[in-house]
């Protein structure tokens, strides 16, 4: 099978911006959750396995140096992957955080509110909002992190009633 580029982003950025992207990537990897990569209207969610191959390479070519960081794994090791592009999803206030499983009766949505803060909500297939983040986040990455925390910690949560 021929190589297929699923996501690519190349542009000049400040060192602080690059550090922020790497920090977000590191946080997602540490939390064992999917990794969301975004640039403009394109995005992809990937879920690397627990121990992918990690390559660091520094090259000098034609008077330029490059530093390449690469994670690599066999697709059969993936825990789940979903992709989205501008052609596949509308760029509205509500961005779908990933394709919902066929058995799910709801979907998580991540969106920017009127105060320009990021929030998430769980929406039933009938359109009713079942749950919300309850707070605004300064970045979409932090909203996704909060949403994933609920997804991971709530399945076996006990019910307490008074």
Image: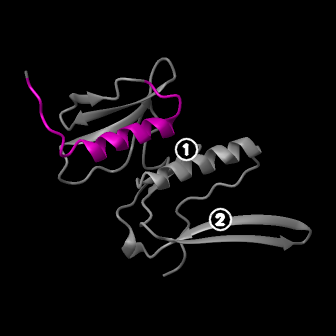
The tag earlier along the polypeptide, 1 or 2, is: 1
Q: Which residues are magenta?
A: 136-161
**Tag shown at residue 138:** none
Q: Quadrant of residue 155?
A: top left
Mark 1 against mark 2, which lies toward the viewer? Answer: 2
Q: Residue at x 62, y 51 (%)?
A: 22
Q: Counting other residues with Cα less than 10 Å from the Cα at mark 2, is it few (<14), some (14-19), or many (20 or more)?
A: few
Identify the residue at horizontal 87%, vertical 65% (top origin): 64
Query: Pointer 1: what residue?
Result: 41
Q: In the displayed image of the protein, which residue is found farthest to the bottom?
A: 1
Q: Secondary structure at mark 2?
A: strand
Q: Around disc 1, counting alpha carbons within 10 Å, would you say few (fewer than 14), some (14 to 19), or many (20 or more)? A: few
In percent of the image, x 11 and y 29: which residue is there?
Answer: 160
Image quadrant in which the C terminus is located: top left
Q: Is residue 84 visible?
A: no
Q: Say above or below: 31 vs 64.
A: above
Q: Secondary structure at mark 1?
A: loop
Tell which of 116 and 41 is nearer to you: 116
What residue did someone put label 2 on?
69
């Amino acid at each position: 099978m021929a190589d297929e580029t699923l996501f690519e982003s190349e542009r000049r950025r400040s060192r602080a911006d690059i550090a922020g992207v790497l920090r977000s990537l590191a946080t997602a990897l540490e939390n064992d959750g999917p990794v969301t990569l975004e640039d403009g209207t394109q995005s992809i969610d990937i879920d690397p396995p627990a121990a992918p191959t990690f390559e660091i390479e520094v090259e000098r070519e034609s008077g330029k140096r490059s530093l390449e960081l690469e994670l690599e794994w066999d697709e059969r090791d993936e825990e789940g992957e979903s992709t989205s592009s501008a052609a596949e999803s509308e760029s509205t206030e509500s961005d779908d955080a990933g394709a919902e499983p066929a058995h799910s009766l709801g979907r998580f949505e991540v969106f920017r509110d009127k105060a320009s803060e990021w929030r998430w909500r769980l929406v039933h297939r009938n359109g009713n909002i079942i749950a919300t983040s309850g707070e605004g986040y300064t970045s979409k990455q932090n909203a996704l992190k909060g949403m994933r925390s609920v997804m991971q910690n709530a399945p076996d949560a006990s019910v307490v009633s008074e």
